[in-house]
Image (cartoon, rainbow, N blue to C red):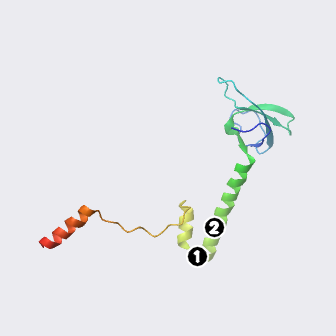
């Protein structure tokens, strides 16, 4: 839930209210009526008015900045992988595997499997 007075950006217009997407506003009230689809009352300085918006139409500035940083980081890693002809890095980035793969752990046999294997070798 957003705090009162918090700066938010309009990222959608799901109810076609002619909201200025990409502009900022300030949370000035919560809509507490359970029967209402709107969650917040936002003050938009550019329009010089208050509007009711659902939570899906607004996003905090910090979240948008982090998304942009992640996008730029991914693009720069792709550029680096292409420049160095690092196919493994390129495939990992394109497939969405963000974590660096560690060496696979060797399969450890259970005690019963080990005893079966020894018994089979002894039988032969």
- Which residue is pictured at 54% across the width and 72% down the height? 87
Relative to 106, is 27 on the left or the right?
Answer: right
The disc placed on residue 85 is: 1
Q: Secondary structure at mark 2?
A: helix
User: The C terminus is located in which quarter?
Assistant: bottom left
Q: Where residue 113 appears, x then y in whole percent?
A: 24, 63
The disc placed on residue 77 is: 2
- Which residue is pictured at 71% across the width and 37% down the height? 13
Residue 67's place in the image compared with 89, above or below, is: above
- Which residue is pictured at 69% across the width and 54% down the height? 66
Name of the residue lying farthest toward the left = 123
> Badge 1, how many Cα within 10 Å: few under 14, some, many 20+?
few
Relative to 48, is 32 on the left or the right?
Answer: left
Q: Pick whichever, 124 or 122, lies toward us.
A: 122
Q: Where residue 71 appears, x then y in whole percent?
A: 66, 58
User: The N terminus is located in which quarter?
Assistant: top right
Q: Tell me where residue 54 sits by quadrant.
A: top right
**Going from the N terminus, do you reach mark 1 or mark 2 first?**
2
Q: Where residue 8 appears, x then y in whole percent?
A: 76, 42
Name of the residue lying farthest toward the front = 111
- How many numbered discs sit on the rendered protein? 2
The disc placed on residue 111 is: none
Q: Secondary structure at mark 1?
A: loop
Q: Where residue 112 appears, x then y in whole percent?
A: 24, 61
Q: Tell me where residue 7 sits by quadrant.
A: top right
- Closer mark to the observer between disc 1 and disc 2: 2
Relative to 84, is 25 on the left or the right?
Answer: right
- Which residue is pictured at 80% across the width and 40% down the height? 25
> Badge 2, how many Cα within 10 Å: few under 14, some, many 20+?
some
């Amino acid at each position: 839930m957003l705090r009162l007075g918090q700066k938010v950006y309009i990222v959608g217009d799901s109810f076609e209210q002619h909201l200025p997407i990409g502009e900022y506003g300030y949370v000035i009230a919560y809509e507490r009526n359970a029967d209402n689809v709107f969650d917040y009352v936002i003050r938009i300085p550019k329009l010089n008015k208050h509007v009711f918006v659902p939570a899906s139409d607004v996003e905090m500035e910090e979240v948008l900045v982090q998304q942009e940083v992640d996008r730029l980081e991914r693009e720069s890693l792709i550029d680096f992988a292409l420049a160095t002809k690092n196919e493994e890095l390129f495939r990992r980035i394109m497939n969405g595997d963000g974590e660096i793969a560690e060496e696979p752990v060797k399969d450890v046999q259970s005690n019963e499997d080990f005893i079966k294997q020894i018994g089979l070798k002894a039988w032969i």
